[in-house]
Image (cartoon, grey):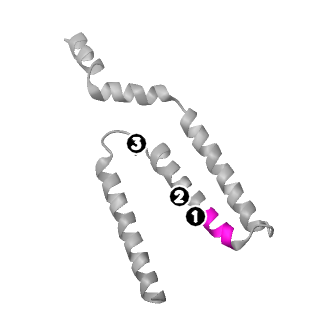
């Protein structure tokens, strides 16, 4: 009986998914960590350097923040794997609401 249960567990979709996750190893996490450190250094250098204009620095830092947020979501929080559609939907809804709110405030102030 134990061998039948073990055979069923080995062929279940969840065990295949877990095996695939464990086989990827730490390589993507190490790359994401390394790139996050590099992006942080680039952001600091852009702010600390007087050679870079403010008109470039602010969009550059926002771009680096978006990339680092994507690393957080997809590498560290595993949002690219199955069964994460529900939280991802709510996060994207929050982003949409924030963009609409900020756009509305900007239109009210400058129009």
Residue wearing tag 1 = 62
Horizontal side of residue 78 vs 12, given as left or right: right
Q: Which residue shows up at 23% across the image and 13% down it? A: 2
Local secondary structure at mark 1? helix
Where is residue 4 drawn, in percent x and y?
21, 12
Horizontal side of residue 63 vs 9, given as left or right: right
Residue stretch rendered in magenta on the structure? 55-61
Where is residue 35 drawn, in percent x and y?
63, 46
The quarter holding residue 64 reads bottom right
- Mark nearer the N terminus (2 vs 3): 2
Calculate the distance from the C-alpha at mark 2 to the C-alpha at mark 3: 16 Å
Which SS does the magenta portion mostly show?
A: helix
Horizontal side of residue 83 vs 25, given as left or right: left
Number of other residues with Cα within 10 Å of mark 3, as a class: few under 14, some 14 to 19, many 20 or more: few
Which of 53/28 is in front?
Answer: 53
Residue wearing tag 3 = 80
The quarter holding residue 5 reads top left
Q: Which residue shows up at 60% across the image and 45% down it? A: 33
Where is residue 75 drawn, in percent x and y?
49, 43
Work out which residue is located at the far left of the displayed protein and give it. 1
Residue wearing tag 2 = 66
Calculate the distance from the C-alpha at mark 1 to the C-alpha at mark 3: 23 Å
- Asked if marks 1 and 2 touch (Cβ < 8 Å), the reply is yes
Number of other residues with Cα within 10 Å of mark 2, as a class: few under 14, some 14 to 19, many 20 or more: few
Q: Is residue 56 magenta?
A: yes
In front of the other: label 1 or label 3?
1
Q: Is residue 89 magenta?
A: no
Q: Which residue shows up at 32% across the image and 58% down it? A: 90
């Amino acid at each position: 009986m134990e061998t039948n249960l073990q055979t069923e567990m080995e062929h279940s979709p969840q065990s295949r998914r877990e095996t695939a996750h464990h086989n990827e190893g730490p390589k993507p996490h190490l790359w994401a960590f390394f790139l996050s450190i590099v992006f942080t250094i680039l952001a600091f250098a852009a702010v600390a350097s007087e050679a870079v204009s403010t008109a470039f620095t602010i969009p550059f830092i926002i771009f680096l923040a978006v990339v680092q947020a994507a690393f957080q979501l997809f590498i560290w929080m595993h949002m690219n794997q199955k069964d994460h559609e529900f939280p991802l939907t709510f996060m994207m809804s929050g982003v949409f609401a924030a963009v609409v709110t900020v756009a509305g405030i900007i239109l009210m102030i400058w129009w």
